Amino acid sequence: MNEVDFTINNIVAKASIGREIELNALAEDLEKGEIDYSALSQRLTYRFPKNNCTIVLFRTGQAMLMGSSTIDAVDTTWKTFEDELQVLLQTEE
């Protein structure tokens, strides 16, 4: 059997913001990536081209991160999103 060299090109990770969220309002306020909101499927797609990572966020607060080839890129993308979200949620209160 021949030896095979594998390359990681698409990490998929699951995360949560810990609460339900109004995606339509959030889609209007996010600014650090490219946004696509779908009312029909109740999901917000937030793309970060710099990290080649996409966050798909659901109304429940559950999120999927996908597309990056490194854990560091996934971590950086999530941290960027969390920081932006925290500022927006503090403004909401």
Image (cartoon, helix red, strand yellow):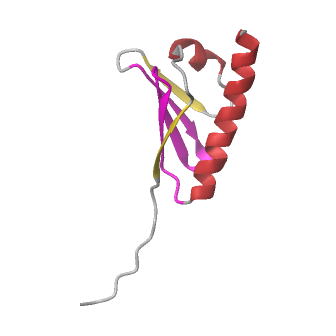
Instruction: Name the residue at the left extreme.
Output: 1
On the image, the x and y values in percent for residue 25 come to: 58, 12
Name the quadrant of the C terminus: top right
77 vs 17, nearest the viewer: 17
Residue found at x 54% / y 21%: 19
Residue 47 drawn at (x, y percent):
55, 37
Q: Please, is residue 35 above or below residue 29 in the view?
A: below
Q: Residue furthest front?
A: 18
Range of the magenta residues? 42-69
Q: Residue at x 75, y 23 (%)?
A: 87
Quadrant showing the N terminus: bottom left
Q: Quarter-wise, where is residue 17 in the image?
A: top right
Q: Relative to 25, does residue 8 appear above or below in the rendering?
A: below
Taking the magenta stretch, the answer to whether it contains residue 91 is no
Q: Main secondary structure of the magenta part?
A: strand
Corner quadrant of residue 89: top right
Residue 15 place in picture, x, y as percent: 51, 39
Say if 33 sits above or below 70 in the image. above
Q: Residue at x 61, y 53 (%)?
A: 73
Which residue is at a point 56% across and 49% down the rendered structure image? 52
Please say whether residue 68 is one of the residues in the magenta stretch.
Answer: yes
Q: Quadrant of residue 92?
A: top right
